[in-house]
Image (cartoon, rainbow, N blue to C red):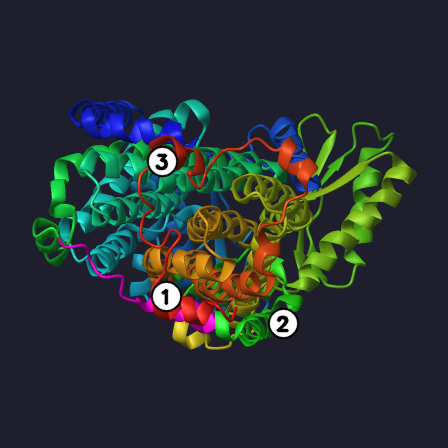
Amino acid sequence: MATFLYKLGRLAFRRRRYVALIWVALLALAGFGAASASTATSSSFSIPGTEAQKAFDLLEQRFPDSSADGATARVVFKAPDGQKMTDPANKAEVNKIAGELKSGSDQIASVTDPYTAGAVSKNGSTAYVSVSYKVNSMELTDATRDALKDAGHTAQKSGMTVEIGGDALQVMPETGITEVIGVAIAAVVLVITFGSLIAAGLPLLTALIGVGIGVSTITALANVLDLGSTTSTLAMMIGLAVGIDYALFIVSRYRAELAEGREREEAAGRAVGTAGSAVVFAGLTVVIALVGLAVVNIPMLSKMGFAAAGTVVIAVLIALTLVPAMLGFAGKRVMGRKARKAAEAGNRPEAKPNMGTRWARFVLRKPVWVLLVGVIGLGAIAVPAASLEMGLPDDGSQPTSTTQRRAYDLLSDGFGPGFNGPLMVVVDTAKSSDGKTAAKQVSDEISGIPGVIAVTPAQFNKADDTAMITVVPKDRPSSTETENVVHAIRDSGKDIKSDTGAEVLVTGSTAMNIDFSQKMNDALLPYLALVVGLAFLLLMLVFRSVLVPLKAALGFLLSVVAALGAVVAVFQWGWLGSLFGVEQTGPIMSMMPIFMVGVVFGLAMDYEVFLVTRMREAYVHGEKPGQAIVTGFRHGARVVTAAAVIMMAVFAGFIGSSEQMVKMIGFSLAIAVFFDAFVVRMAIVPAVLALLGKRAWWLPRWLDRLLPNVDVEGEGLRKELGGAPSDGEGRGDAQGERELARV
């Protein structure tokens, strides 16, 4: 592979104008496709194989006019002190607003009258108007949302408190500012790393071109493939991360080759042949992690994974072709001023020990202590993960500054927390001899379940073969008690089916969230096994070793569990919650663990492949195991550190979001990258390799013959090209030799 990539790198360098033209043309084509495509709506959300989805599908079939998948809103009114919502003036105002809502938009399916629907609290202080829409929240027009927001303005003038809850006001959180901040921090880190504006700007430029092509393609195909708006957000985040990383690796190796005195085209070829091989396999691990999301069997997640994986493939191709082409345009300005002057004078730079070299030597002297501190430290942080509770946040987790949160609190005070997440029980009486009696039995059974405070009479469809029953639990939607109520209803439904033939199904947003969380929970271990297993085989192919991939996988699991522990401590227990703007503790978003595993695994393997490949390369070229570790750190530590800091900056920018879910994702990814890059890859990995010595690179002979030789470290390329070894290959400074002799 190294030989093929070497030739590809030289070709891209020589034909740089054609290569650049092809990528610019692809960007223009994708941009034109995105601009001419119709506006994407929200992707249809379904959870195949769950009871909530089965009930939802049945509702759409048997109650076609109910807009089961439509958005909902609740306009909550609270009377001024000393008054009641049943007072004639207040009642007239509410009825007037309900009428305005009905005529305010053709997207509205129904508006309830609180005085006939029993939506007035017992003490008369609070009432709410329920609004149902024909389309989901992402398809609501701005005019419809404005009509909803304006509904309570006149009532507020009369002294009433009016707040609006439900998903009708839900919009995609804006992330543009955080992305700009992340790119700005990336630029600063790259300038510090390379000491050259040209070298710093090149990874940013190529990464943005790759993201532009990927996201524009997703936008162009959004309606055809039913891709939601969150798909492009994930693709942008991942594409930006790996795009900068991969270009950074190639540019760094190119500069090292130039420093060795090689010609520019030769340096580009060798950079792509060696660092490019690491990029290919690092990209493959990310693709495996993202495509593996299909294991969960939730179409929306699968599409997000495939789309993001496509963006990663584009990032790899750009690193192998466009980056060497751009290096051709940059000339020797890709080097810092001092390095250029030294090269012009014909002076070879002195191999001074850098920070990576000094740190590697320290680890080699104290490997056991470094290993113990790293493992025990991460283990202690991981302890809270044992208390992980998964769910989906409701409006109660919103900031108190939002109308959704204030509406949630008003309903909780006036009616009880359960009114914020009523359950929809669907009774399929098609196979029952007496549907009315069966529905009555279901209502009676549910009324006796602990934790239920209200059950509405059964509402049958026109064919009288399906009934809907609304159940109000006592506790808030995301609580464990409400989850127990859902399971209790389902358990009692089994007995009713055997007695009457009627099938009882529970759905609604609360039940959907519970089933979604359970499905994600059940998929976590199979997903981990698939991703880690495939990556283990891939890394075994790369490193020609059994123990190095095993150590990489175990180290990743340690960093992920530690990150989960930190997330539980902050968002579930509330530790340091005020520092991160956590206003309401609660369950951890059920999608987050799998999402974090997929994203962080890909990035962690990036750092592992780039750092350890350089060690493997030095070892294969004749260095002793300890010396190879130092060589790997001398060349790779600075680049891996820069890449990790950039990723942490990009992800940490999302912590400032007002959305709890976005805040949680940003925190989890930033802390996981920190643990994995700086504790696992930079400390635990060299400590383990130092303790293993030559055994680290052991591979059974039969397995060595069985595995194809992909030549990531460029041994075949070196033999073919010949020439002097590069800096650090087969030699080291005198001080390093003396220290490593003891290892």
Secondary structure beneath label 2: helix
Quarter of the image for residue 64 reads top right
Query: Is 557 inside the magenta-drawn segment?
Result: no
Q: In this rendering, does residue 368 appear at all?
A: yes
Q: In this rendering, is residue 414 above or below 185? A: below
Would you name the residue on which mark 1 appears? 357
At 82% across and 35% down in the image, what residue appears?
502
Q: Residues within 10 Å of mark 1 (few under 14, many from 20)?
A: many
Secondary structure beneath label 3: helix
- Compute the Cα span from label 2 to label 3: 43 Å
486 to the left or right of 340: right
Is there CB contact under 8 Å for labels 2 and 1?
no
Quarter of the image for residue 349 reads bottom left
Is there CB contact under 8 Å for labels 2 and 3?
no
Residue mark closest to the camera, 2 vs 1: 1
At 46% across and 67% down in the image, what residue appears?
740
Question: Which quadrant of the rendered structure holds the N terminus?
Answer: top left
Q: In this rendering, is residue 460 above or below 625? A: above
Q: Which mark is residue 383?
A: 2
Q: Residues within 10 Å of mark 2 (few under 14, many from 20)?
A: some
Mark 2 or mark 1, earlier in chain: 1
Magenta residues span 347-363
173 to the left or right of 519: left
Mark 1 or mark 3, earlier in chain: 3
The type of residue carrying mark 1 is Thr
The type of residue carrying mark 2 is Val
123 to the left or right of 324: right
The type of residue carrying mark 3 is Gly
Mark 2 or mark 3, earlier in chain: 3
Image coordinates for residue 279, horizontal then vertical, percent: 40, 41
Image coordinates for residue 380, horizontal then vertical, percent: 59, 75
